Image (cartoon, coloured by chain):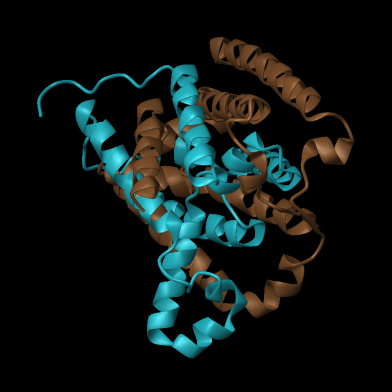
Chain colours: A cyan, B brown
């Protein structure tokens, strides 16, 4: 693949596209988008494979044990869609994306640690940027807007501490 | 199942097109040099909100059949704070980490692993947070219900605020 990577789409145009996808999910599936639920479903599956009784007795994991979750298929689609889009645009590339002053190892540690923090946050909040913020934001859910406000506030508050990783 | 995969494909495609599979681009939102996250997210919210409102009004979509994320004030506030801090550390959110990984980025895969570890450990230790998790439940409460104003009024206000937000975002980016 020698052609140069294309530029990203205009954010408003991409936003309209994303909004129409979300609207289509409301009409077709009667629910919005999601991501963190797929992680919950996978974690529940792992616990159920090792200790089935424990998984059933745990109110967080047991909610995911009634068959494979809708969100697992949706996330599978996200992978395919992300791959195809990057491929068509010449953006497929094995790399560790990091800031100019960050080491590869430091970047991976931050990625893992930040991911774990988001995991805990998403369990408590019952969703993430997709299922809670985007979906509930469009449906004017009070909890979703609380989550959006809190997440943006904390990210801005924490950004100066993380400056060395990104700038 | 087919619908779930199809919707997911379109979702992943839109995120990648916008550049939201790039951690540096996402992190730039919080250093005010590239506000793509804000612009994409709020454009999508406005479009889906207007679509749901008008399709509901025209009788094409029965909003009673659309699941509205329910409200638990304290856990969603605390969860949001943890999530936001994790977001600027990781540079990607759960959905966009999948897109980053799908386009070959190892940091995206690391965020996914971390996310999985966080959900798993919190789930295992669920008994210690369960009381907090179930506190301040408000059910499927919406902003129009909370503020006791018509649905259309809130929709109009969100559109107006978003449009002002976009203008401010453009100005901030020009200055950066």
Residue B34 in view of the camera: yes
- Residue in view at x 25 percent, y 43 percent: B104
Residue B122 rendering spot, x and y as whole percentages: 57, 70
Residue B107 in view of the camera: no
- Residue in view at x 24 percent, y 36 percent: A84
Residue A112 rendering spot, x and y as whole percentages: 43, 57
Residue B118 rendering spot, x and y as whole percentages: 51, 65
**Displayed quadrant of residue B24:** top left
Quadrant assignment for the C terminus of chain B:
top right
**Displayed quadrant of residue A118:** bottom right
- Residue in view at x 44 percent, y 46 percent: B95
Tell how many labels.
0
Reply above or below: B63 against A68.
above
Q: Nearer the viewer, residue A41 or B4?
A: B4
- Residue in view at x 61 percent, y 10 percent: B171
Residue A68 rendering spot, x and y as whole percentages: 40, 66
B17 horizontally vs A146: left or right? left
Residue sitting at the far left: A2
Residue sitting at the far right: B148
B157 horizontally vs A137: left or right? right
Q: Nearer the viewer, residue A118 or A52?
A: A52
Reply above or below: B62 against A61.
above
Quadrant assignment for the N terminus of chain B:
bottom left
Reply above or below: A55 against B137.
below
A152 horizontally vs A87: left or right? right
């Amino acid at each position: 693949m020698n052609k140069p990577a294309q530029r990203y789409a205009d954010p408003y145009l991409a936003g309209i596209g994303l909004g129409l996808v979300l609207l289509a999910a409301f009409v077709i599936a009667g629910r919005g988008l999601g991501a963190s639920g797929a992680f919950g479903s996978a974690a529940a599956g792992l616990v159920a494979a090792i200790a089935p009784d424990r998984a059933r007795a745990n109110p967080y994991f047991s909610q995911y044990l009634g068959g494979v979750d809708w969100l697992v298929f949706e996330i599978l689609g996200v992978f395919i869609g992300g791959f195809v889009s990057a491929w068509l645009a010449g953006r497929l590339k094995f790399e560790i994306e990091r800031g100019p002053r960050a080491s590869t190892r430091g970047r991976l540690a931050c990625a893992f640690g930040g991911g774990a923090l988001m995991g805990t946050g998403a369990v408590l909040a019952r969703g993430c940027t997709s299922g809670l913020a985007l979906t509930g934001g469009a449906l004017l859910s009070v909890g979703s807007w609380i989550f959006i406000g809190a997440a943006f506030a904390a990210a801005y508050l924490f950004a100066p501490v993380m400056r060395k990783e990104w700038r | 199942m087919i619908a779930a995969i199809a919707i997911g494909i379109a979702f992943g495609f839109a995120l990648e097109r916008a550049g939201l599979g790039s951690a540096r681009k996402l992190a730039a939102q919080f250093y005010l040099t590239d506000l793509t996250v804000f612009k994409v997210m709020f454009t999508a919210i406005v479009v889906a909100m207007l679509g749901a409102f008008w399709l509901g009004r025209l009788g094409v979509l029965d909003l009673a059949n659309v699941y509205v994320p329910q409200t638990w004030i304290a856990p969603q506030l605390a969860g949001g704070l943890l999530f936001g801090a994790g977001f600027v550390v990781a540079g990607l959110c759960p959905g966009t980490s999948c897109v980053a990984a799908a386009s070959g980025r190892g940091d995206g895969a690391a965020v996914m692993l971390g996310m999985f570890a966080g959900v798993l450990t919190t789930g295992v230790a669920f008994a210690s947070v369960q009381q907090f998790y179930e506190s301040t439940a408000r059910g499927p409460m919406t902003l129009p219900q909370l503020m006791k104003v018509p649905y259309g009024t809130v929709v109009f206000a969100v559109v107006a605020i978003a449009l002002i937000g976009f203008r401010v975002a453009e100005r901030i980016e020009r200055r950066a």
